[in-house]
Amino acid sequence: MSNKINHSMSLAKPDAQDISTKQKIALATGLVGLLILVLAFFNIDFPNRAVFLALSLGLITVGTVVYSRDAYLTKLEGIKNDGVWFKSISSRGVIGWALGVVLTAFYIVLYFYPQFLGLGANGSANTGLIALFDPLSNLLSGRNASQWFVYGTLYTIAIAVFGYKFILKYRHNKYQQLRTVSVIFFQLGFAYLIPEFMYVMNSDLPYYDLKSVWPLNYYLFQDYHLNQFLGAGNIGIALIIFGIVSTLVITPILTYKYGKRWYCSWVCGCGGLAETAGDSFRQLSSKKMSAWKLERWLIHTVLVFSVIMTVAVVSSFLKGSWQDGVFVEGNYWLSNEGFLIAIGVLLTIVFVGVMVFKRNELGKDARYGAIGYAIVILSLFAIYFTGTNEEIFFIKSSTLKTAYGFYIGSIFSGVIGTGFYPILGNRSWCRFGCPMAAILGFQQRLFSRFRITTNGGQCISCGNCSNSCEMGIDVRAYAQKGENIVRSSCVGCGVCSAVCPRGVLKLENDSMDGRINPTEVLLGNDVDLMDLLNKN
Amino acid sequence: MEHVVIIGNGISGVTAARHIRKNSDKKITIISAETNHFFSRTALMYIYMGHMKYEHTKPYEDYFWKKNRIELKNAYVKTIDTNAKTLHFAEGDTLNYDKLVIATGSKPNKFGWPGQDLEGAQGLYSKQDLDSLERNAPNNKVCKRAVIVGGGLIGIELAEMLNSRNIPVTFLVREDSFWNGVLPEGESAMINRHIKNHHIDLRLGFNLKEIKADDNGKVKSIVITETEEEIECNVVGLTAGVAPNISFIKDSRIETNRGVLVNRHLETNIPDVYAIGDCAEQRDSGIDQRRPIEAVWYTGRMMGEALAQTICGNRREYKPGHWFNSAKFLDIEYQTYGWVYGERGRPEYEKHFHWIHEDDTKCITVAYHKDTKEFLGINTFGIRMRHETFDRWLTEKRDVDYVITNLLEANFDPEFYKHFEKDILAAYKKNLQTA
């Protein structure tokens, strides 16, 4: 809640930060656009859907753009966070909670009750909100809209218009601008348009966002997806190979060179939404030690779950499937046994490599890693030895897959991850749940040239950096000791550096030497004293 | 077990406590009447501006103190009896110590202006100052105008704070250009323009004559000495510097001047009594070219570290290295390394090279020795510089040519930022030709 002391007896809004007349008009414009969507949701059938859809999306865009321009272009360039902890929406006030509830409800309907959005069942025509989007979907791919098309469109617009707001807010900061342009580009092109065009070219291809990498898109290696790929000829095979290469080769190389930020804050759509639409909520992430402990257990558990689920699903796919009550054995060049052995060998190489070369850097974390590793290896044995059907630990792999899709893919990433923006901060999914972030973070911590360096003794411990860290890193704790920040969770958004009033923080790609300096290295003090402090 | 008592829970006292705990098992008590827990004073402005809440300004979570066995006592020390090694509190109770650290910081200067103690007239240093500002200037309806007196770093922060709530500000500065006692004229002039660009009514060369009260004893207006002009206002910010907060020590045997007098080991004239941070004053004169009293965040931290060693039986001098500092003037970041003097007190050997960008928000000034060309210091505005590099160059006694030629090595700006080193070098070469 806001900590503002309000001595005004006025019944009108007592906030110091009032919005201008122009902003009020812009807000009204945007809300009218939103109202059209709401009316459509309540099954109001608009006569000319194409016109009303364009009107709705247009008004929302214009409203946000005009509002943002008036908010930032009327002031000089610089950090503009005035009043974020006073505004109800951005300080877990009434509006913040209300927004959280509405968003959460929307996600529940979207994932579990698409019929309420108007999705036509069994080939019947769409109604309501989804029908409103039919003209646009027909224009792009020649088919009627689905709830995912509606969601994708709104998602893309949100990233674009709030991205524009973000660019204005940080117009003095080239890093922030470029990264936002990049995120808008990848969302609009790779996540939204290209998959639609791929469908136009080859309607047998499943939806495939090329920039999306396993395990974030956990469905990549699932049977229905693999079947669709295999049924789509050479291009399908090529896409499977690309999916594997992007996970095993491209990702580690880019992470080595630039840190996980190349993905999390320059490419990823989840990150894109968090950075743009979620920017107003970045200060809400908890920086408590307890939150950090929870984060580390949770995100790595999700990763372990995701690995086991994927291996089980692929394994049962390779074994074969039940078709019309008859079990048809899989007949692929890669046998189930071969696959499990290959995964086992790969994991062992990674594990042994880490233990031999990086044991000291990981310290206590190595123990947690070993536990997770042991669970995965035991699961591999279980998958191999437990009978002819598809059970592991007496749980069907399809059940495992459904559970993962339900609890992680839907509830965690959507309902909590985005719905709880106004409560838990904008990156709670990236921070607590994303298995991709866990893998990239593991790579970043172990072998990346990326780090955030601190500027000698200039830190005044003001806490702006920690406050604006969406990943809940207590940046100040490092900066005030003069210690480089090498954290697996850091997505490299660079806002800590931007808001620092003393120019203390800088994101850098540099050599691996001296990257980790877990000591006090404050400049200004006499050198002997620092040596002494570090010895103690 | 030896009992170390620290008066003051600012950066100096808390750093001392932390390092004493690292090195020993002594009993440690920190006393403060300001807040229960350590917070970062430098962030007070961001609480008012709504960037952060009070709890975000605490560098350590509340469990930290218990976990590290550092006792916190919320009390106000009234007198110190150094013979009996006893503190007497305003509440009437007492506390014995074996070693005493005075780290009470500063209080805002007041120069005897009529009306300076009225409700609505205040400095900006403590949590209480912030609370009273929140009371007297919650918005621009309650506070129709504020006047700030004194042209230093706290003054401009206060102006920025009030500006964030759309409260009109008149800023009275005694000098004829903002902070020109410290900044060279080109920089000071640039900041003047920057302040005015924020619609702050900057009045240069004006002094406060008196503060007038309304019927309720609250600030009503101020009068300017030079013009006799009366300005209606509800808040007056008194930000003409700070002075050591040591009035309760004056009656003790501890020797004081403006601050508590200490030697290079931060020891006072009384055994087992030490002083660190803003309230400590170096005997004789300052270290190197530093002033005897330095109210700077990082020197407080360094004194705390050094003193902790001494208290733990490892007697050490306080040795601050090369001077550096930083600040932010509204939207312009400022950093300084080494010594760059303004008009006042500039040594006759010191020469300057000044470069300013055409957008009027970035500039640098490099000070060097006119005969030896030795690099003496640099001020940068709107360009971040790497502390480590300048620290090394100052130690290596580089000349000014080397520094300007290698400026890129010291750049600390975020990635993709535009660089100005070439422009600076070109301007420097041109300057040499015309000089």
Image (cartoon, rainbow, N blue to C red):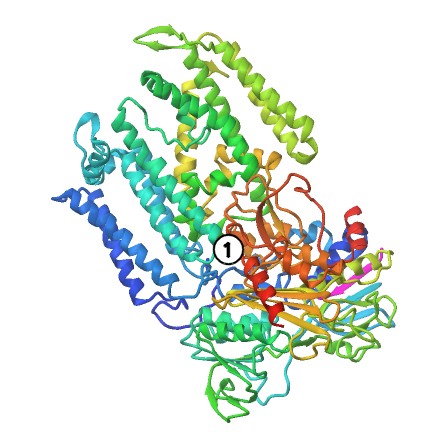
User: Magenta residues?
Assistant: B1-8
Considering the image in quadrants, where does the C terminus of chain B appear? bottom right
Where in the figure is residue B344, as x and y percent of width and height?
A: 67, 80
Does residue A459 appear in this view? no
A183 is higher (above) or lower (below) than B104: above
- Secondary structure beneath dot 1 equals loop
Where in the figure is residue A188, as x and y percent of width and height?
A: 34, 40
Predominant SS along the magenta part: strand
A357 is higher (above) or lower (below) than B411: above
Where in the figure is residue A471, as x and y percent of width and height?
A: 52, 45
Please give left or right for residue A344 compared with residue A312 in the image: right
What chain does badge 1 belong to? B
Considering the image in quadrants, where does the N terminus of chain B appear? bottom right
Query: Is-magenta flag for residue B349?
Result: no
User: Residue at the spot x=39%, y=51% of the render?
Assistant: A97
Please state which amino acid type lies under the numbered disc 1.
Lys
State the image quarter where residue A375 is shown: top right
Please give left or right for residue A483 compared with residue B285 in the image: left
Q: Which residue is mark 1?
A: B418
